[in-house]
Image: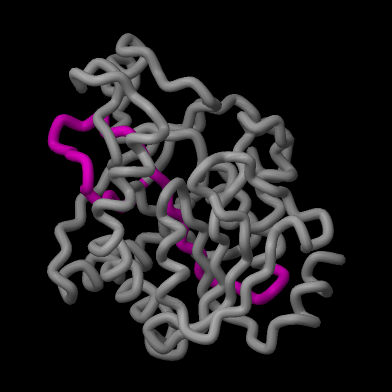
């Protein structure tokens, strides 16, 4: 793969842990030591995001004493990208040797017990994007446990170690880019969804297909449509992410430390 060859020529380490960061969460890379930053636009065939809050960089460096492969920003199907393009960065990660992938997103809270600032471990998802053909290699993975239960336990331990309250929930992915209507949110709640967003499911499914262990987190940035007195906006998502970024960074750094196979023996 041309993109992998390009990165290997520029990176001196091959991290076992990778992370893809959603809207407003890219500030985590500023904590990395000795980072090597490469713009998506400079990597052969790598998709470039057009959404505010997605920097568009591969950043490889050290975090919590561990080597980390970070995707600072992602692309979405609603930007006009086909599915294979959306999951291309995950394929690059896997080819580069990443064994554990952490997928983060900013999401709207459907569960009445969720509030802006909450961190939710994804236990399962609903693919309502309608863009993964059942006959494709992605579709064939739908019956498997995509979000690794052992990794979820390690995340719970990390939360306890740094004093962060962690909740669990089911993530519903819709195609976007418009936010959901109140009627759609009521239907999603009846179906069993706890939070809603426009990403993560394609990457999680592909990572699982490629044999990577997947850990997913939703960061609640707003209450979903019909649950809030104010109109939803992407600016609200970014501002809420920035207000709570310190807590998120503290937690993610401990998760990365706990997931590293050199220390876990897995």
Q: Is residue 111 magenta?
A: yes
Q: Is residue 250 magenta?
A: no
Q: Position of residue 215 (x, y in %)?
A: 42, 59
Position of residue 37 in the picture relative to residue 102 (left or right): right
Position of residue 253 in the picture relative to residue 214 (left or right): left
Q: Position of residue 145 (x, y in %)?
A: 45, 51
* 51 versus 93 height, above or below: above
* 266 versus 194 height, above or below: below
Position of residue 182 in the picture relative to residue 206 (left or right): left
Q: Is residue 140 visible?
A: no
Q: Quadrant of residue 70?
A: bottom right
Which residue is at a point 41% across and 66% down the rendered structure image? 28
Viewport quadrant of the C terminus: bottom left
* 125 versus 72 height, above or below: above
Which residue is at a point 63% across and 72% down the rendered structure image? 37
> What span is in magenta?
95-123
Is 3 in front, or is 190? 3
Picture mark count: 0
Which residue is at a point 70% across and 30% down the rendered structure image? 80
């Amino acid at each position: 793969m041309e993109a992998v060859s390009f990165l290997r020529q520029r990176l001196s380490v091959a991290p076992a842990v990778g992370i893809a960061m959603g809207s407003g969460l890219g500030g985590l890379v500023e904590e990395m030591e000795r980072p090597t930053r490469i713009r998506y636009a400079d990597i052969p065939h790598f998709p470039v995001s057009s959404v505010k809050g997605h920097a568009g960089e591969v950043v490889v460096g050290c975090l919590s004493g561990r080597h980390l492969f970070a995707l600072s920003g992602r692309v979405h199907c609603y930007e006009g990208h086909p599915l294979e393009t959306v999951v291309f960065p995950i394929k690059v990660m896997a080819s580069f040797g990443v064994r554990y992938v952490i997928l983060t997103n900013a999401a709207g809270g459907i569960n009445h017990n969720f509030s802006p600032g909450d961190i939710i471990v994804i236990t399962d998802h609903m693919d309502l994007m309608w863009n993964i053909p059942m006959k494709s290699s992605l579709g064939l993975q739908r019956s498997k446990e995509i979000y690794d239960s052992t990794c979820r336990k390690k995340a719970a331990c990390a939360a306890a170690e740094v004093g962060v309250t962690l909740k669990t929930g089911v993530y519903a992915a819709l195609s976007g880019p418009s936010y959901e209507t109140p009627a759609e949110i009521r239907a999603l709640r009846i179906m069993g969804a706890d939070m809603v967003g426009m990403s993560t499911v394609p990457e999680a499914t592909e990572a699982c297909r490629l044999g990577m262990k997947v850990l997913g987190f939703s960061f609640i940035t707003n209450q979903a449509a019909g649950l809030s007195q104010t109109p939803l906006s992407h600016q609200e998502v970014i501002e809420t992410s920035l207000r709570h970024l310190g807590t998120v960074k503290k937690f993610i750094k401990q998760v990365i430390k706990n997931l590293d196979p050199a220390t876990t023996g897995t």
